[in-house]
């Protein structure tokens, strides 16, 4: 079962991905993102969806629908505006969920 | 701890004892599952963290290259160079079972076999900054896919650990004590009944003897 990779974000951040063979979906408005993400994720063509960090926080409800499924994996990446720390924050929330308190990132 | 609402009968007692053994065995197994999941999860999280820090750094370098490229090229030319990719990344999705959690395994493939064949444009009218940007992004791709795989695994495992932890706790602190209390309650009740019927019988025997022979046993 061959699937592709998608990237959603503002066009400045993701146009590089296009050159290396990732399908890009420009999304300039935060409000459009949930709808776009749902369309892409439900089409079942993508194993991995990269989202820029600015958009990542705005689609929490949509993301939770795909949490238990094997694909797509929805992964935040820093956009052109710089790193907001969302990725590491997400990681520490996993640890907190599993262990009960964050024992890895609180140093 | 409240006891269960049951009749204090021998049948209930046997049933509860059986349930208690099952609960204890289940608790032990779930605890082992939780511990093993936790061990693997923590390893994975550490790997995830290192990979993410590396990728975030390199991705910002890539973005810097792109910004440089867009400084020397017009926006239209830049977009035109990038928008018709030669390559297409495909991913084979497999699953890997870690303590009954199905985690994904991504294997990346490309449309053409030539790894160097990534530049979707001619070199004549583009800046070398763009070449750098595309090349460093291409180098980053395997790591990006690995990050996706590990991060998804972490996500699924943390949900499973939470579930297992809750189950272990509810067995340990609610179910098993409740069973034990109820079993204790029933066996005490049965012993009490036993004693009371014994004394009643002795009393009756006394009364009968007294009546028949005018004779007392004591």
Image (cartoon, coloured by chain):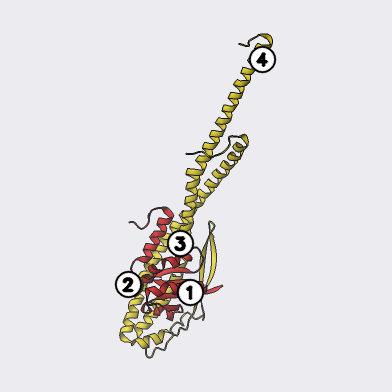
Question: Of marks 3 and 4, which one's residue comes earlier in the chain?
Answer: 3
- Nearer to us of marks 3 and 4 is 4
Left or right: B190 as drawn, with respect to B168? right
Residue A55, position in %: x, y?
Answer: 38, 71
Q: Residue under label 4, please give it.
A: B208
Mark 2, secondary structure of its residue: loop
Is there one chain holding both mark 2 and mark 4?
no
Q: Quick check: marks 1 and 4 in contact, CB under 8 Å?
A: no
Between the C-alphas of marks 3 and 1, the distance is 22 Å
Left or right: B210 as drawn, with respect to B81? right
* Letter of the red chain: A
Marked residue chain, label 3: B
- Nearer to us of marks 1 and 4 is 4
Between the C-alphas of marks 1 and 4, the distance is 90 Å
Between the C-alphas of marks 2 and 1, the distance is 27 Å
Q: Residue under label 3, please give it.
A: B155
Q: Residue under label 1, please give it.
A: A39
Q: In this view, does B149 lie above or below A103?
A: below
């Amino acid at each position: 079962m061959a699937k592709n990779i998608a990237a959603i974000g503002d066009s400045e951040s993701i146009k590089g991905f296009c050159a290396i063979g990732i399908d890009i979906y420009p999304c300039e408005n935060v409000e459009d993102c949930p709808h776009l993400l749902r369309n892409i994720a439900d089409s079942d063509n993508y194993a991995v969806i990269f989202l820029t960090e600015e958009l990542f926080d705005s689609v929490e409800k949509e993301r939770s629908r795909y949490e238990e499924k094997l694909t797509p994996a929805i992964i935040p990446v820093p956009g052109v505006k710089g790193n907001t720390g969302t990725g590491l924050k997400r990681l520490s929330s996993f640890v907190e969920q599993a262990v009960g308190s964050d024992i890895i990132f609180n140093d | 701890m409240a006891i269960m609402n049951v009749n204090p009968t021998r049948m209930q007692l046997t049933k509860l004892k059986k349930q208690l053994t099952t609960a204890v065995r289940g608790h032990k197994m779930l605890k082992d599952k939780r511990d093993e999941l936790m061990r693997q999860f923590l390893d994975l999280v550490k790997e995830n963290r290192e990979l993410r820090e590396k990728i975030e750094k390199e991705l910002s370098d890539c973005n810097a290259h792109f910004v440089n490229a867009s400084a020397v090229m017009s926006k239209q030319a830049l977009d035109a160079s990038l928008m018709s990719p030669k390559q297409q990344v495909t991913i084979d999705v497999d699953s890997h079972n870690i303590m009954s959690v199905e985690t994904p395994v991504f294997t990346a493939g490309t449309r053409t076999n030539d790894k160097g064949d990534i530049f979707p444009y001619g070199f004549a009218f583009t800046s070398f900054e763009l070449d750098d940007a595309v090349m460093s992004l291409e180098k980053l791709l395997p790591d990006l896919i690995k990050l996706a795989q590990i991060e998804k695994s972490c996500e699924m495992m943390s949900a499973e650990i939470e579930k297992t932890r809750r189950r272990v706790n509810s067995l340990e602190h609610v179910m098993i004590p409740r069973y034990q209390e109820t079993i204790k309650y029933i066996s005490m009740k049965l012993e009490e009944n036993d004693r009371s019927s014994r004394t009643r019988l002795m009393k009756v025997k006394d009364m009968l003897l007294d009546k028949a022979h005018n004779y007392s046993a004591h």
